[in-house]
Amino acid sequence: MHNNPSRTLTHSVAAALVAVFSIVSVAPASAVAKRPSLVVGIMVDGLSMDYIELLRDQFGENGFKRLLSQGLLINDLDYGTALDPAAATAVVFTGAAPQVNGIPAATVYDRDTRRARSVLFDASKIGNFTDETLSPAAITSSTLADELRIDGGGTNYAYAIAAEPVQAIIMAGHAGNSAFWINDHTGKWATTTYYKDLPASPQEANRRLPLERRLDTLQWVPSIPVEQFPDLPAHKKLYPFRNIFQRGDANRFRAYKNSPAVNADVAAMAADYIRMLRLGSREATDMLSLGMTVQPYIYGREPDSRLELMDSYLRLDRDLAAIFAAIDREGPGMDRTVVFVAGTPLTRRQRRDDEKWAVPYGEFSSRKAVSLLNMYLMAVHGNGEWVSGYHNGQVYLNHKLIKERGKDLEEMRREAASFLTRMVGVSQAWTVDDVIDRRATDNPDATRRNTAMASAGDIFLAIAPGWQEIDDDSDVEAPQTVVRAGMATAPAFILAPSVAPKEVTAPVDARVLAPTVAGILRIRAPNGASLPRLRP
């Protein structure tokens, strides 16, 4: 019998295709890395690459040195303008600027009540261990925690722990399980009824060993011999600091939250969460977000707090190492975990230098500025309360009265800005129209995107460097601080099994971090993230 050539060819092609498909089906499966089991996001207020480099020899092997040697280092995460920690955290976790995410600062001015309030104020919620009424409703875009929870179908967990409420809630997002922070007045771990998941660890801490009781015996002194601190002038070595948190001091809990002691508490709580909640043990990826600080200590006896600042970094280094050790010991292991650490810009407010140095100084009274501006506008436009108030460098005009009198709002803003520019202590003034049209500040594009129009004032002021801005309507006692030019950048690190060690020296837009982390986790980027991810 003769062979059929066409049939033989068909069989050969079929056999070849089977072989090819067998190869194709096997190769990708072995090449795709397993998705991480846990992601830990750490925001560090005031983090500076200068101090990390200065203290590198004093660090242990498993904190900052581990990040530097094994992770991706971004030297300058660029926020565009000097945002406060709450707004900077929102940029990192949403991948969007305040113009999109709705969070321009921790507090905003309420035109109805004519008072400052939390940006996350929500009267429909109540607090647990606090009288604060907060929720994430004001965050107008999704967050990393939201996208992770959605990706996991709710079978995974997302928790946040921080000293400050707004930062904690931003990190937990809309879909997170819970956010806990430390109450300014009681020192208790607190949360909002928006979140339904109440882990046992913070509640047990409130009951068994509350901060109020511990503070009576807690003192902060240098953690290493003073001689070992680098670049320290001789006079600073003679008088090491000793900071205590005395009962009866109205600022004792705020001072504690400005000290490295709070980082140790956050790190200890994080270890408890990893162990008790078995984070990283599920099919879907869990998330734990932490807020820490190395901001200059403003509650000490001396304005020069560089010794306290260096000690804060040394202590934070140990706290980071403790968190990494907890992941290895109680969690899924660092080889199955993504860690990102992002700094927020250094605060613009620092203690005033001693008068003996004769550094130019003045006091800018917001109440006086509002009163004088209102008198000027009355002289030009007739009697009335033309100015509603002032908050966070912004003046708010009375829109209702301006409309009733048939005045042009934009022209009124220009008149007010022109008057305020001539006021002592004001270096510059811009209208919100200048901001919208990108005519304000030396970085007009960044100023525009970092302005949330829903809460923006009518005139933006730049207070002269070295001047103390007096908030006459504030009910919070605080040490005297003066304005300094604000930094808009901070370092960031990504430590992940799939990310090779690398240093990025060029500035990187802070909005890039969220889509970059999302790409590593193989989830969607937050819905407000418009920039492409880094591909480390």
Image (spheres, helix red, strand yellow):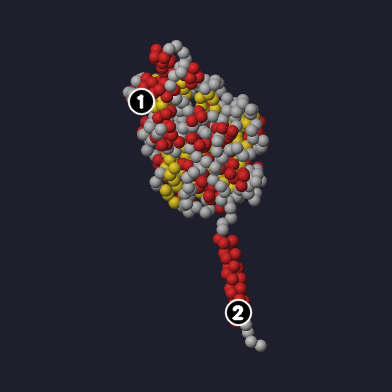
Q: Which labelled disc corresponds to residue 6?
A: 2
Q: Nearer the viewer, residue 120 or 17?
A: 17
Q: Which labelled disc corresponds to residue 137?
A: none
Q: Which residue occupies 62% across, 44% down?
A: 149
Q: Nearer the viewer, residue 412 or 406?
A: 406
Picture coordinates of residue 535, whole percent (x, y): 47, 52
Q: Which residue is identified by label 1?
A: 427
Q: Which residue occupies 60% across, 68% down?
A: 22
Amino acid under label 1? Ser
Between discs 1 and 2, the one toward the N terminus: 2
Q: Which residue occupies 38% across, 25% down?
A: 429
Q: Is residue 482 left or right of residue 8?
A: left
Amino acid under label 2? Ser
Where is 152 relative to 248, above or below? below
The secondary element bearing badge 1 is classed as strand
Q: Which residue occupies 39% across, 14% down?
A: 380
Q: Is residue 120 left or right of residue 411?
A: right
Q: Is residue 288 visible?
A: no
Picture coordinates of residue 436, whole percent (x, y): 43, 32
Q: Kindly indicate the quadrant of the structure image that contains residue 7.
A: bottom right
Q: Nearer the viewer, residue 7 or 80?
A: 7
Tag in front: 1 or 2: 2
Q: Nearer the viewer, residue 217 or 354?
A: 354
